[in-house]
Image: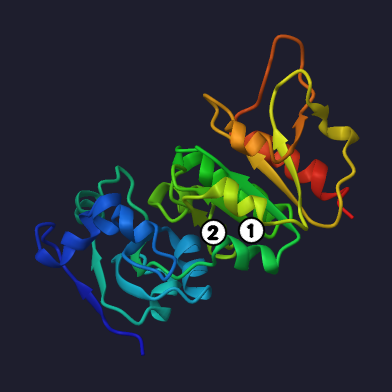
Amino acid sequence: MTRAVIRIEDPDDPRFRQFRLNERGLASRADKRDDAGAGMFLAEGDLVVERAVAAGCRPVAALVDIERIPTVASDLTCPVYAGGEAVRRVVSGLGVPSAIIALFHRPPRPTVAKLAATARRLVVVEGVDNPTNIGSIIRNAAALGWDGLILDHTSADPLSRRSSRVAMGTVFSLPHARTTTLADDLRELVEFEHYALTPAAHAVSIDTIRPGHKLTVMIGSERSGLSDALLELATPVRIPMADDVDSLNAAAATAVACYALGRRSG
């Protein structure tokens, strides 16, 4: 049942404190490693909130524009607070605040094995600690029809505020698994062919690969690339580049790889 909108004009109102929590305040390191779902995440903007609700995420509280209450607010079974732009700017910390920001309980997520059991094509991310890159990778994978994302524990949180915003809420439709034992978990996926993106000269050009029915593509840190442990599991592939340019950024490389490998997979 939808609750009535509660108008508040004092940015210091204690009910706004929850919206001011930073990423660590919303979810601790232990929360982010908990597959059962622990802590909270913040969704920002109409579309992201709509997709979180559609995915079944449980809302905690929302803050909306009193002058333009988004339609999705009527779908929220939680306290919905409203304020003018000045109040929402202070509370959200944004120069131009969104018409809605909402807090949700973090949902449970699958293990690597459970995700792989229902997937054909998976993106694997290691050491990508920029949430903007993670959000873009998610959006690319979802748009190009891949089935899920596997991240190591050093990569940025897909449910972080910036990541979910950059992904335009597709993080809620693209399942992800997070693991502290990435190489070991991938080694267990014996039905999958693994392809590792690298600028190394000995790597096979990606436009010559004809992958099988089940595959992963591995994306590493822009600074150090993939670890030796992952490279040993995979066929190294490279994206052909112009002279004197050795690589694309992680998000752009993922888009190229997902398109090139996805359309040729068996």
Work out whether residue 95 or residue 205 is closer to the camera in this orientation and state it.
Answer: 205
Work out whether residue 166 or residue 67 is closer to the camera in this orientation and state it.
Answer: 166
Q: Image height check: is 188 above or below 96?
A: below
Q: Position of residue 69 (x, y in %)?
A: 36, 69
Please tell me whether mark 2 or mark 1 is closer to you in this view: 2
Tell whether 154 sits left or right of 172: left
The reply to whether callout 2 and callout 1 are in contact (CB within 8 Å) is yes
Tell whether 193 sits left or right of 64: right
Give the residue displayed 70% in from the left and 33% down from the top: 197
Specify the quadrant that holds the C terminus: bottom right
The single residue placed furthest to the top in the displayed view is: 244
The mark tally for this picture is 2
Tell whether 239 sits left or right of 58: right
Q: Image height check: is 167 above or below 103?
A: above
Residue ID for mark 2: 177
Mark 2 or mark 1: whose residue is earlier in sequence? 1
Residue ID for mark 1: 148
Residue type beneath disc 2: Ala
The single residue placed furthest to the bottom in the displayed view is: 1
Specify the quadrant that holds the N terminus: bottom left
